[in-house]
Amino acid sequence: MNTELLDAVDARTVELLRALANPVRFRIVQSLAARGECVVGDLVLELPVTQSTVSEHLKVLRDAGIVRGTVDGPNRCYCLNPDALQTMRLAFESLEQRACC
C-alpha cells in the first residue's frame, strides 16, 4: 500500500500491524502481555524457534516500537510499549464505531 495516501497516525498504525503480521512476533507480544516483561531466554524456552530467530523477531518489534528492551547484566529484558498499543487500540476503536450493526 502506498503510505502517501495515509496520514501520520494511519501510517504508524500500518507500521505496527506489519510488525505484528507474523505468527512468532504475535506470540511474543502475547507472551509479553501475559508476563509484563520477559528475558529473551524465557521466550526461547516458550517458542518453537531458535534464540537467534527470537532475537530477529524482537528486533522487528523493537524497531516498530511495539516492545522496549533493557539490558540487565548479560540479559535483555523486554516489555510492551503502551504507546504503540494505544495507537492500535484507537485505530480499531475508530473502525469499530463505523462497523455494520
Image (cartoon, rainbow, N blue to C red):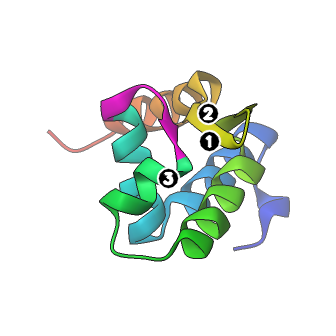
Q: Indicate the quadrant containing the N terminus: top left, top right, bottom left or bottom right.
A: bottom right
Residue at coordinates 57% horizontally, 75% vertically from top-left?
A: 53
Tag 1 near tag 2, CB within 8 Å: yes
Please tell me whether mark 1 sits on a helix, a strand or a loop.
loop
Residue 61 spot, x, y in % from top left:
64, 53
Lower sequence index among marks 3 and 1: 3
Contact between labelled residues 1 and 3, with CB atoms less than 8 Å apart: no
Amino acid residing under circle 1: Ile
Give the residue furthest to the front: 74
Q: Who's the residue at 42% across and 48% down the image?
A: 42
Name the quadrant containing residue 12. Answer: top right
The residue labelled by disc 1 is: 66
Earlier in the chain: of badge 2 and badge 3, it is 3
Q: Nearer the viewer, residue 50 or 1?
A: 50
Magenta stretch bounds: 34-39
Q: CA distance from mark 1 to mark 2?
A: 5 Å
The disc placed on residue 41 is: 3
Please tell me in which quadrant of the rendered image residue 30 appears: top left
Does the image show residue 60?
Answer: yes
Q: CA distance from mark 3 to mark 1?
A: 19 Å
Q: Residues within 10 Å of mark 1 (few under 14, many from 20)?
A: many
